[in-house]
Image (tube, rainbow, N blue to C red):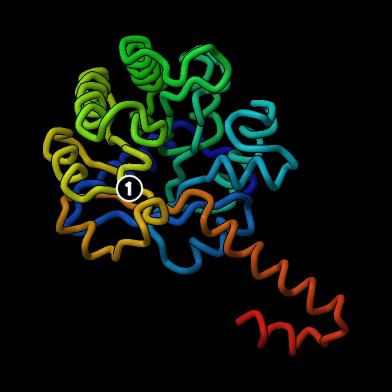
Amino acid sequence: MNDVPPTEIVAARAAAFRQLHTGPGMLVMPNAWDAASARAFAAAGFPAIATTSGGVAQSLGYKDHEDAPAEEMLAAAGRIARAVAIPVTIDLEAGYGLAPAELMRRVVGLGAAGCNIEDSDHHGAGILVSADAQSERIAACRAAARALGVDLVLNARVDVFIHHAGTPEEQLAEGIRRAQLYREAGADCLYPIGLQDEAILAAFVQAAKIPVNINTRRNGNTPLARFATLGIRRVTYATSLFRDLYGVLDGFAAGIKDGLPPEGVRVRSA
């Protein structure tokens, strides 16, 4: 699967991906960082996969949070999307400084079914982009994707909780305010990354009124069944699978360096 699919196929994948958010169970997606990991996750039977910007960036030799050039990040995301026949949603970080129309043109051109966009301010003076500015950006992305004939699933990341600004109550109030604005702007899903308190998470889910995405590792490895009782509709893993695999590789390399045969290293790593 090396060719970019035509627009009608991308649109069909986006529609199928959207439907996965409305099923009876949660949508659980591992995060791929290259074509090989994407193929492994697809072969395991997952109905869709996400990319991890942190894993992609590190595999390319960069740090997370838009340290890598947009061209390299998007090219890598395209290789992931082309490697599998299932829907792929791309982590766009904060958009790499690209205008919404150009950003969506590239995302659709890569064959993606959806994308994440976050409200952290990686290059400006502030910690977060203003809620109004981010809402306008989401609305512009929504309009641009539809103009291209693809109703992408837009996952709006709400970064209030990872910056720990204010009391938990103040963070919740600001998180809900942003969630409501992003929903009204056209977001299909909300991602309150770093929100771990179950009572606050439940309040956020109730206020969201659209599917909520959670990163399971940032929530203390909470069992998936528990997320379901809290009303979570979508679960992803961010960079955790990438880190786990390379943790095994570190042990494998150390074992070989110590003179162990590969078979012995595998037993020790397991």
Decide if residue 266 is on the left or right side of residue 193: right
Identify the residue at horizontal 63%, vertical 53% (top origin): 35
Measured as percent of width and height from the top left, residue 83 is found at 59, 51
- The residue singled out by tag 1 in the image is 214
Q: Is residue 69 above or below residue 227?
A: above
Q: Quadrant of the C terminus?
A: bottom right
Residue placed at 44% from the left, 53% from the top? 237
The answer to whether any part of residue 154 appears in the image is no
Count of marks overlaid on the render:
1
Question: In the rendered view, does 155 fall on the left or right side of 3?
Answer: left
Residue type, mark 1 in image = Ile
Q: Position of residue 198 (x, y in %)?
A: 21, 50
- Of 250 and 211, which appears nearest the observer? 250
Horizontal placement of 155 versus 227: left or right?
Answer: right
Q: Position of residue 229 (x, y in %)?
A: 15, 58
Q: Quadrant of residue 204?
A: top left
Most extreme residue toward the front is: 167
Determine the residue positioned at 51% across, 31% down: 92
Which residue occupies the foreground of this view, 267 or 197? 197
Lateral position of residue 201 relative to residue 107, left or right: left
Residue 128 in sight here: yes
Residue 218 sits above or below residue 57 on the image: below
Q: Secondary structure at mark 1?
A: strand
Image position of 179 with respect to 211: above or below: above
Percent of width and height locating residue 82 = 58, 46
At 38% from the left and 28% from the top, the residue drawn is: 150
Looking at the rendering, which quadrant does residue 70 occupy? top right
Label 1: few (<14), some or many (≥20) within 10 Å? many
